[in-house]
Image (spheres, rainbow, N blue to C red):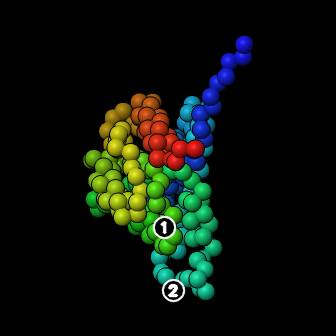
Amino acid sequence: METVVASQPMIKVAAICGSLRKASNNRGLIRTALELTKESINGIEMEYVDISPLPILNTDLLVDGKLPPAVEAFRQKILQSDSILFASPEYNYSLTGPLKNALDWGSLSPNVWADKAAAIVSAGGGFGGARSHYHLRQVGVFLDLHFINKPEFYLNAFEPPAKFDSDGNLIDEASKEKMKLVLVALQAFTLRLQPKN
């Protein structure tokens, strides 16, 4: 008698970093998430979506109803995803300008963020970027993003032991395990939000 093994449904996750610096610790969190989805978490296909090519939001850039090519490419990647992983550094108790710009471009009609599951991770000093989570969640309410509630991931990057190397790569094993919990929760919530077939 053959055993039938149900395969885990595959979800597509767009990973977005609010920092444009290549050696950013927050970008390092995204790299870790990408590695984890390839090595130890089944059912997640994750793609890093670069927001640096996006022009500053200016609706005068719409010509004959068409968006600039970089914006359209970005919007298509978000549309093709089932959920979003944000790495959101905290700048002045808030999210970064580049991240807010990406959110605004995506919110133009039709809103590409609507009804997607999302999770936020961050690294920084003090509260580890936690205050940016609050602001991003509030923006997400208007955009119809649905954030996981737990676990929360905000990492004090400067508290011993070392969490990152000089290139911004996450080296702390306990933090990698916590990241894995975030990804599993995002996966479960994404599947819960999807319509039943």
Residue 75 occupies quadrant: bottom right
Name the amino acid, label 1: Asn
Q: Secondary structure at mark 1?
A: loop
Q: Secondary structure at mark 2?
A: helix
Q: Residue at x 42, y 48 (%)?
A: 119
Percent position (x, y) of residue 26?
44, 50
Q: Is residue 29 visible?
A: no
Percent position (x, y) of residue 47?
59, 50
Q: Which residue is mark 1?
A: 111
- The C terminus sits in image quarter: top right
Q: Residue at x 32, y 39 (%)?
A: 159
Name, please, the residue furthest toward the right.
1
Q: How many marks?
A: 2
Q: Is residue 91 above or below residue 129?
A: below
Q: Is residue 109 above or below residue 18?
A: below
Percent position (x, y) of residue 156?
33, 43
Please report whichever mark, 2 or 1, sits nearer to the chain's N-terminal start: 2
Name the amino acid, label 2: Asp
Q: Which is more toward the observer, 103 or 145?
A: 145
Q: Which is more toward the observer, 95 or 20?
A: 95
Q: Is residue 31 above or below residue 142?
A: above
Mark 2, other Cα within 10 Å: few <14 / some 14–19 / many ≥20: few
Q: Which is more toward the observer, 65 or 85?
A: 65
Name, please, the residue furthest toward the top.
1
Asked if residue 134 lies left or right of residue 146, the reply is: left
- The N terminus sits in image quarter: top right
Q: Which residue is mark 2?
A: 60
Q: Is residue 51 visible?
A: yes
